[in-house]
Image: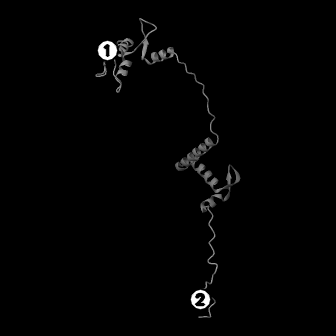
Amino acid sequence: MSDTRFQKGQSGNPRGRPPKPRRPDISAFEILLDKRLTATVGGKERELNVEEVLQQQTLKDALAGKRMAIRKVLKMIEKREVALAKKNPPPPRNIPFEIHHCAENANEAMRILGIAAPNPTHPNRWKVNTWATQAALSRPGRRKFSKRDVESIKFFTDNSNTLRWPRGRIE
């Protein structure tokens, strides 16, 4: 056996197997999409990549009434709108507003909503409508009313003798 090319215990390939070349990080699909094609768009020949040709074909199918193509085109439009909104956000609108703290404004709001009305015997004094007072009294979880609170509520409520007072909430 001494007539072999390599001696016993010595490799015939001292450097070892060469490494395989690394595959690029792009997929075959991406390579296909980057391929350039010549297409006729609007009667003119243009050079487009496969992705652009597919988009043109999808648009053509959508215009022909194919539902899946219509759905795809709507999604493309939505993506484009989102991208444009990110790129160019709308300018902030500074809307000036004024706050007027005035008893007349509050009185007018209560009159419009039907919560209160001017007292016919005292025009500068307003009376709260019975339904509004009753709604406030009926709210659960409120504190107990003192005799003074009850008298004040009766004084400022129109037709206060029809109020139903909650049980257990008057001291």
Tell me the distance, in whole angstroms, between the alpha carbons under discs 1 and 2. 117 Å
The kind of residue on which mark 1 rests is: Thr
User: Is 111 left or right of 57, judged from the image as shown?
Assistant: left
Query: Could you tell me residue 33's position as x and y percent?
Result: 63, 58
- Residue 150 sits in which quadrant? top left
Q: In the displayed structure, would residue 109 be above or below residue 29?
A: above
For label 1, the residue is 162
> Which mark sits nearer the N-terminus, 1 or 2?
2
Query: Could you tell me residue 27's position as x and y percent?
Result: 60, 61
**Marks 1 and 2 in Cβ contact (< 8 Å):** no
For label 2, the residue is 8
- Residue 25 sits in which quadrant? bottom right
Graded by Cα atoms within 10 Å as few (under 14), some (14 to 19) or many (20 or more), the crowding at tag 1 reads: few
Please tell me which residue is depicted at 57% across the width and 44% down the height of the picture: 78
SS at mark 2 in the image: loop
Nearer the observer, 46 or 109: 109
